[in-house]
């Protein structure tokens, strides 16, 4: 509890605020014998960094990861792996003005309600920088899963109301990193960029939908009744800042379908049981069926906009106005893709260990 | 783990299959001194029973709860409360035929993949009967919360594509039990009943959306970053059979909004901080703001339809057909309302204890 | 938390007070496919019943177990197993007199401090009857472990100051049930019986030491640093009422040894690594070595004695006297043996699952 | 799980091996508003450092702690606190020789059995250096507890067979740091030093007993049945390297006492309920009584001795000999005192939060 620990057997503890000295993660439960290095982690961290494109805001943070424990001769030892990234480029002053006036859509107010004080420097632990620890931990999870044939890809399915066309796992994997919006449909990507640019001009922001797919999942993962695979995915993804909804397979569309339309028929194919459709999203009764896992999250528009907003002054207890200055991304979904993949990887690594598909002690002989 | 335990401080362990001897729950963590009786639990269990209306199927199960421990002179002792409901009306034979042919949309196939065998009698632990334990545990949670001014109401917001109009918490509380569809908008309720009736004739089924609201929540509940209040609500609700999506506040609509539309402005009202709108659904940064909690789940249509469906025969490893006989509800959302309320109550009871709003040991002096 | 749940992957939830309607346990995490029946559980429960011998007090409780879920065609389904034993032979009245005057050595006072009220009927949850749930759950754990060649035996090593001579695992297993004191050394057993008889006459009681040995344990069990195998054994055994100490291998004797005496030398034997001695008790660095596990608990004398004792009256806030009437065992260790074995079995079942030595989903194919 | 996380509400995750880059801890669950600084932590870390006295071996490790998160304007923020100590003075080479020949009494063999490989550099995670994280986390726990009037003191009660006389809490607190053996009885301390010196000459080592006392504990702490306060203390202390036994109050002596001797009589004193003796050690039925907590651990002699020992060669699978070189303390108990205090502090901080004696969110207003 206390909220900063995630997972049962593949367990991460994240720490660090945006304007503290560093942010990081401790990964506990990675079996011994997995080959890895800083490069594997850095690759994922680089994907989440701001300042990479027109859809994010330039900030010069190097975000270079250091591995402090749990590795010996290039392989995991089975003991905890501590990783950190030093903070720099602090610019505390941009945030000082808001200390007493909570920003609408942000967690300023609720953090003060909970803790009595709030590290107001840049959002503290409620800012996106705390996701560094998740992505670093998720990178290890991804690596572990790849040894078992499990692959994960995320992409932006919708942005500012513009929806990409339906594409296969391989097509998405192939194209997702080609554009800053991380949309694998080039036409939709182009429109998304225009939309975001327009909103940035207006000092406003856009929301969207991120989709994550997992291929190569064995049937039988998930622990009814409460630790169902989809329930754990929901919790993991809803824990990412700015997420307001989660759905799997047909999701909210299922609410409008008939049973005869929704049910995926079973059939034999190459001696294996599969389904003719995948409205279930790869999960039935909370347990994986062996088909691709397909899930989505609804991402709200960036709350930090430069337009004038109404708020209160907590010291005078009167209404007040606020205009947020500083550097802010006009849209979150493209940056969220690696974070969403990381959370999904963490859930799968945990379930694979818990269900006995991966030896918890060691990958060696 | 092992999936049948839910909660950290207000913790329930459910057990029992639909065609085993009984189903039940053990509630651990209820502080001492709470007055309660079988009647409090029975009231909630009666709401979930099938055979109550035109939207469900008559089955004569009494579902009478027995409290076996944890109570003394009408008050909780602070020790575990064990409650059970005996099974009757078994009708195993209706289900025998499907032992080798997994029903599409059901967990038959995935349960076999996980356990190697499957108690095929009526869905076993994947059937709706396992929700009895949740509702009984949730009834205690609701009672505890009521002592702290927290009230919960659920209702059917949408069914078979027909959506109710927007109503207030009090209007919903007032009207929800007046119709079998549990929709507080009489006009929409009427159309829903007609729709369901038609689908039943066709041997098909309908999905829908259940909404749950919570009033009286203090600000400051929720444990960033992973045990956020909305993340825990998502996990709790997604663990209910047939749920394919979860959203809070504006939910998936937020994906299509601008920041200036989505952000709820803060303002002072009667000396308290509140918001002019509630797109956040009562939660910001994973912590409650004090405003009403508003969340929804997408419910898929009942998978058990009488229409002919395609499946496989697991013994012959060939394609096969299946026509499900027996008694099945043509739609789930109305019956899910008390279950959804129960899960929400469990999450709030747990968080209220974890965050120190309720004394974990005793309610007495 | 809330204290009534034990274990991570092999998890039990116990419930019930001595004078409530029943006591029981829910076992979560037993893989599917284990053959078992009421008889397997009853066998262990019968060992813990009072009234079996001259060292315990006759009470006529049948303690017949009922299995309510989790079993199908004689095998575990992988879903939770709920078991209960109905209470009878209540005799509440014997205990009423003590409601306001806490019995020395008992938990009366501390329970009131914690819960504000106390179910004073027969010790409530602090009485030995709550161990029924543990023994039932432990019986399943024992059965599971036996399929992996792991055997557990407990015995009374010391009673009323009389110590048995050192015997092998097989000798103990052979003889332990032959005497009511559960001591495998016939001479020591005889003296123990005499000692206990004398103390009973005087209205006093005796303490002792229970030893538990485990054979067939694989090397590599235990999770440093905090969930070391010996740390988990300590917690499990110290949770049994009346236990005041735990030790493993040489235990407190090690405090007085030199390193050259304490260290167990390694040597090859039949191609396997073993040790020439076992002062470590089968655990090094918190991980099993493959040698027998040998641990002990110190059991305090029964607090319920008929001699006059000094206490306080909680209502008048003055000193008072108390003479405990009714039926009480003059010594606990013989009755504790099956409970201690059960707790050890639970720890090993849990660790075997967590460390991947047992498939958590199913024992089938 | 995975063993490196301890606690439920006051939760620490430790990481780091002796010869990795650093060792550290993440503390989750410390409420907001606690004033603290590096100095508070450094004070406790300095107590555990080797090279301080004649009873330890000189090694020049600075062990300077750095706080990387969770603090703002000198107070805790309620978010995780990450602390680390950089490793230096590595001297890997001293340990290379033993890679294939497990040292008797050490965890070399069992770690290889568990992980398949073993970071042989200086004991890796099985060495005493991993206790730095515990002591740092425990320092915060101690500080938090002091705000609630709870004080903890540990001392060496017995060393090399020499036992100190019985002293009060205040006498121990006053004198424990005056001698390198951390024994508050000056005469016994003198003999202990002589004993240790002699054993060091012989290339052998001595064991001992560490006692920890806690004063100011409220009545009502502890969660029967499984998370009893004494059971959690046992687990916490048994998790420290080299501990082979735990006892509370009269401990193993209780096994030899009569009930009339063991039971602590209740009496009124200054309007409060107390006891005339404390054989219970401050805990009855797993719940604190308000009296001092008194517990002890049995510490085995340092396994690293320079005398020649028998072992096996894991590559040739033949018997071999080993003579451990390098720098080793001839006795552990004096160095273990701050570690034992830290573990006890962690248990109490956790239970105080879980039982509602400390507000989990904030210490402010």
Image (spheres, coloured by chain):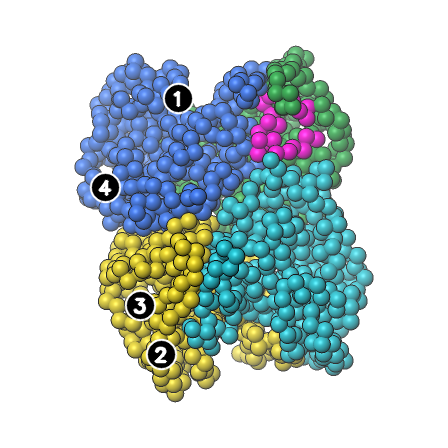
Chain colours: A green, B blue, C yellow, D cyan
Q: Specify whether disc 3 shares its chain with disc 1.
A: no
Q: Secondary structure at mark 4?
A: loop
Q: Secondary structure at mark 2?
A: helix
Relative placement, left or right, of A108 versus C16 is right
Q: Earlier in the sequence, mark 2 or mark 3?
A: 2
Q: Estimate how packed mark 3 is, as few (under 14), some (14 to 19) or many (20 or more) residues with alpha carbons within 10 Å.
A: few
Q: Estimate how packed mark 1 is, as few (under 14), some (14 to 19) or many (20 or more) residues with alpha carbons within 10 Å.
A: some
Q: How many marks?
A: 4
Can residue C213 be seen here? The reply is: no
Tell me where residue A82 appears, x and y as whole percent: 67, 48
Query: Which label sits in the foreground, 3 or 1?
Result: 3
Quadrant position of residue A182: top right
Query: Which label sits in the foreground, 4 or 2?
Result: 2
The circle drawn on residue C325 is 3
Residue A16 versus residue C29: which sits nearer the camera? A16
Q: Estimate how packed mark 4 is, as few (under 14), some (14 to 19) or many (20 or more) residues with alpha carbons within 10 Å.
A: some
| Contact flag, marks 4 and 1 (Cβ < 8 Å) | no
The quarter of the picture where the C terminus of chain D appears is top right
Q: Specify whether disc 4 shares its chain with disc 1.
A: yes
Chain assignment, label 2: C
Can residue A245 be seen here? The reply is: yes
Q: What residue is pinned by disc 2?
A: C202
Residue B322 versus residue A268: which sits nearer the camera? B322
Tell me where residue D247 appears, x and y as whole percent: 53, 68
Residue span colored magenta: A98-121
Chain assignment, label 4: B
Chain assignment, label 1: B
Q: Secondary structure at mark 1?
A: helix
Quadrant position of residue D30: top right
The circle drawn on residue B169 is 1
**For the point 57% across and 77% down, which residue is it?**
C253
């Amino acid at each position: 509890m206390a909220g900063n620990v995630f997972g049962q057997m593949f367990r991460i503890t994240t720490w660090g605020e945006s304007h503290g000295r560093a942010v990081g993660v401790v990964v506990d439960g990675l079996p011994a014998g997995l080959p890895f290095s800083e490069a594997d982690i850095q690759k994922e961290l680089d994907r989440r960094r701001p300042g990479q494109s027109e859809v994010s805001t330039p900030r010069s943070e190097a975000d270079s990861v250091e591995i402090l424990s749990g590795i010996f001769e290039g392989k995991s030892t089975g003991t905890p792996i501590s990783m950190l990234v030093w903070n720099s480029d602090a610019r505390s002053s941009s945030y000082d003005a808001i200390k007493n006036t909570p920003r609408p859509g942000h967690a300023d107010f609720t953090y003060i309600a909970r803790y009595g004080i709030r590290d107001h420097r840049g959002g503290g632990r409620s800012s996106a920088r705390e996701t560094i620890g998740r992505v670093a931990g998720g990178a290890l999870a991804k690596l572990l899963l790849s040894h078992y044939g499990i692959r994960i890809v995320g992409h932006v399915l919708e942005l500012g109301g513009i929806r990409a066309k339906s594409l296969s796992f391989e097509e998405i994997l192939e194209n997702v990193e080609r554009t800053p919006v991380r949309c694998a449909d080039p036409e939709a990507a182009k429109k998304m960029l225009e939309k975001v640019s327009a909103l940035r001009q207006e000092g406003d922001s856009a929301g969207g939908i991120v989709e994550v797919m997992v291929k190569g999942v064995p049937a039988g993962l998930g622990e009814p009744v409460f630790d169902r695979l989809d329930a754990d995915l929901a919790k993991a993804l809803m824990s990412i800042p700015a997420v307001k909804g989660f759905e799997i397979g047909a999701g909210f569309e299922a609410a409008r379908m008939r049973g005869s339309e929704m049910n995926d028929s079973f059939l034999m194919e190459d001696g294996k049981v599969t389904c003719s459709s995948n409205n279930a999203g790869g999960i039935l009764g909370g347990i994986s069926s062996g088909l691709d896992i397909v899930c989505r999250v609804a991402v709200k528009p960036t709350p930090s906009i430069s337009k004038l907003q109404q708020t209160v002054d907590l010291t005078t207890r009167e209404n007040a106005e606020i205009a947020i200055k500083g550097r802010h991304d006009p849209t979150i979904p493209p940056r969220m893709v690696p974070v969403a993949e990381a959370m999904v990887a963490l859930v799968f690594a945990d379930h694979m260990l818990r269900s006995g598909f991966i030896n918890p002690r060691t990958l060696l002989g």
